[in-house]
Image: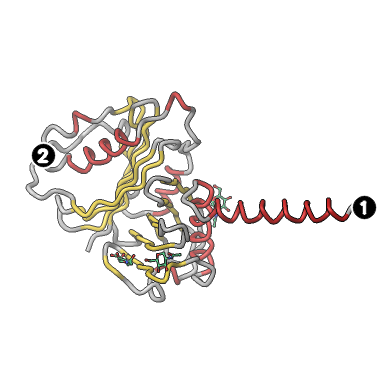
Amino acid sequence: MFGPYTRLTTVVITILTLGSSLVLAECTREGLLAAADSYLAAQTSGSIDDLKLSPNFTYQLNNKVADIKTGVLSQPLKIDLNRSTADTIACASYTMLISATGSQPYVISTQIRHEDNGTSSIALIDTIAATTGALFFDAQKTLGYIEKENWGTLDEEMRTSRDELKRVGDAYLDMWTDANAADSIPWGTDCERVEGSSLTRPCGATLPHGGSQKPNGNRRYVIDETMGSVDVLCSFNSLGDMPDSHEVRVEGGTVKYVHTVTVLQ
Ligand SMILES: *[C@@H]1O[C@H](CO)[C@@H](O)[C@H](O)[C@H]1NC(C)=O
Ligand SMILES: *[C@@H]1O[C@H](CO)[C@@H](O)[C@H](O)[C@H]1NC(C)=O
Ligand SMILES: *[C@@H]1O[C@H](CO)[C@@H](O)[C@H](O)[C@H]1NC(C)=O
């Protein structure tokens, strides 16, 4: 008597299960953040075995294609702080992590890009890894500043459009070559800039106004409107050729936080 219902229940459960795996296979916020968490787990253990990598996977370390088996991801790190954002349009995520209390300190900026052919597998892990010797490097100090920040999800009315977030990220990187770029950025009055471990508050003070002939190139973006954030990985060519990450958070239309991770080489 309960036979048909049991079968129906089975069918419904099967469809629901299928449904959720299909959702995960798309570039959803949940899927992207789950993949970012799998990256953090890999960095914690130093093992990439559980990462869902595409057959056509690339690992990039400090702007160069590298062997993932010898890169920093294959070295276990004690992670003291992590934070991720998700870009459902680009099918990518951005994670910053700080390892201050392990054997070798690191501040790491990683963008993860996924295949957008429905498999959601990881096509690219693109990492800027700063350690002792990097620009203004002091992981403990950076940790102290960044753990005090509030990176909560923004209410609707505090959000900024994707285009404007990208414009702000680009304007920031253009300040060294474009004399007008600094004044085109809506600086918040209580904005804070953490460059390596160097703190500047308010962050609109002491800005470059052009002077370099070399634009910062090779820009890769992860933009998250719900977090008001844009992260740009680039080759910081204006002052040399440095692997670099610049992340900006915009709250209610004005810049609240800027973080930079810059490797000297
Ligand atoms: C998705 O793209 C990757 C890289 O091009 C390819 O290796 C993989 O087979 C594709 N998967 C499907 C289901 O098309
Ligand atoms: C494989 O990866 C490389 C480097 O990321 C990319 O340029 C190329 O288009 C990819 N090939 C396919 C078939 O997706
Ligand atoms: C990342 O940070 C969250 C809290 O912000 C924490 O719950 C989680 O355990 C951290 N992950 C790792 C691998 O440290």
Q: Nearer the viewer, residue 248 or 104?
A: 248
**C-alpha separation, residue under disc 2 versus residue under disc 1:** 80 Å
Q: Residues within 10 Å of mark 1 (few under 14, many from 20)?
A: few
Percent position (x, y) of residue 192?
35, 35
Image quadrant where residue 22 sits: bottom right
Name the spot of residue 30 as percent of width and height, x first. Answer: 53, 48
The answer to whether 77 appears left or right of 253 in the picture is right
Circle 1: residue type: Met
Quick check: 150 left or right of 70? right
Locate the C terminus and report the quarter of the image it occupies: bottom left
- Point out the frontmost of discs 2 and 1: 1
Q: Amino acid at mark 2?
A: Gly
Say above or below: 220 vs 175: below
Residue at image point 34% right, 46% down: 231
- Where's ligand 2: which quadrant? bottom left
Q: Cβ of disc 1 within 8 Å of ligand 1?
A: no
| Structural crowding at the residue carrying mark 2, measured as other residues with C-alpha within 10 Å and reported as few (<14), some (14–19) or many (≥20) | some
Judged from the image, the secondary structure of the residue bearing numbered disc 2 is loop
Q: In the shown orientation, is residue 205 left or right of residue 118?
A: left
Q: Is residue 205 visible?
A: yes
The residue where tag 2 is placed is: 210
Which residue, as the protein is rendered here, is positioned at the far right? 1
Closer to the N terminus: mark 2 or mark 1? 1
Mark 1 — residue? 1
Disc assigned to residue 58: none
Residue at the image point whose x is 10% and y is 50% from the top: 214
At a point 39% along the width and 63% down the height, the residue shown is 123
> Where is residue 126, by image quadrant?
bottom left
